[in-house]
Amino acid sequence: MTRVEKSFRGISERLARRYLSNLGGEIEGGDPEGDGDVIADEWRASVSSEKVQIGASMTLTEVTVVFEGEEGVLDGLIEKFSQKAMRAGG
């Protein structure tokens, strides 16, 4: 089992969970606003966020996604997720 942690700026936890759901996962508890993991047959993803300081007076939300699964599965999943996250502004 491989574990990969990636951070994205400019998206929300809700949007990250929705993207993961669109990529074949199911949100634990069914609520994108909640704090459950997103689970699929071949992978699992945990989503968290924090505010980060950018410069002297600006903050952004940084969402961290921890992907777990087989390396071959995660490579494609992370690439597709990253493309979605980049289009969102992160």
Image (cartoon, helix red, strand yellow):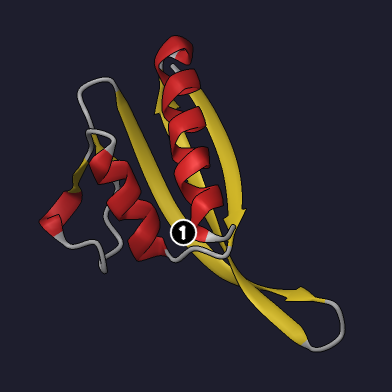
- In the image, residue 40 above or below residue 86: above
Q: Please state the total of marks drawn on the protein image.
A: 1
Q: Where, by quadrant of the figure, is residue 16 drawn?
A: bottom left
Amino acid type, label 1: Ser
The quadrant in which the C terminus is found is: bottom right
Taking the view exactly as shown, the residue that stands out farthest to the left is 30
User: Where does the image place residue 9, in percent across and percent down from the top left?
Assistant: 61, 60
> What residue would you read off at disc 1?
48
| Local SS, label 1 | strand
Q: Residues within 10 Å of mark 1 (few under 14, many from 20)?
A: some
Q: Position of residue 71 (x, y in %)?
A: 48, 14
Residue 33 in percent (x, y) is at 26, 69
Quadrant in the picture for the N terminus: top left
* Residue, far bottom: 57
Quarter of the view holding residue 31? bottom left
Query: Percent from the top left, x then y, of residue 41?
Result: 20, 23
Location of residue 44 by image quarter? top left
> At 26% from the left edge and 55% from the top edge, which residue is drawn?
36
| Above or below, 78 relative to 32 | above
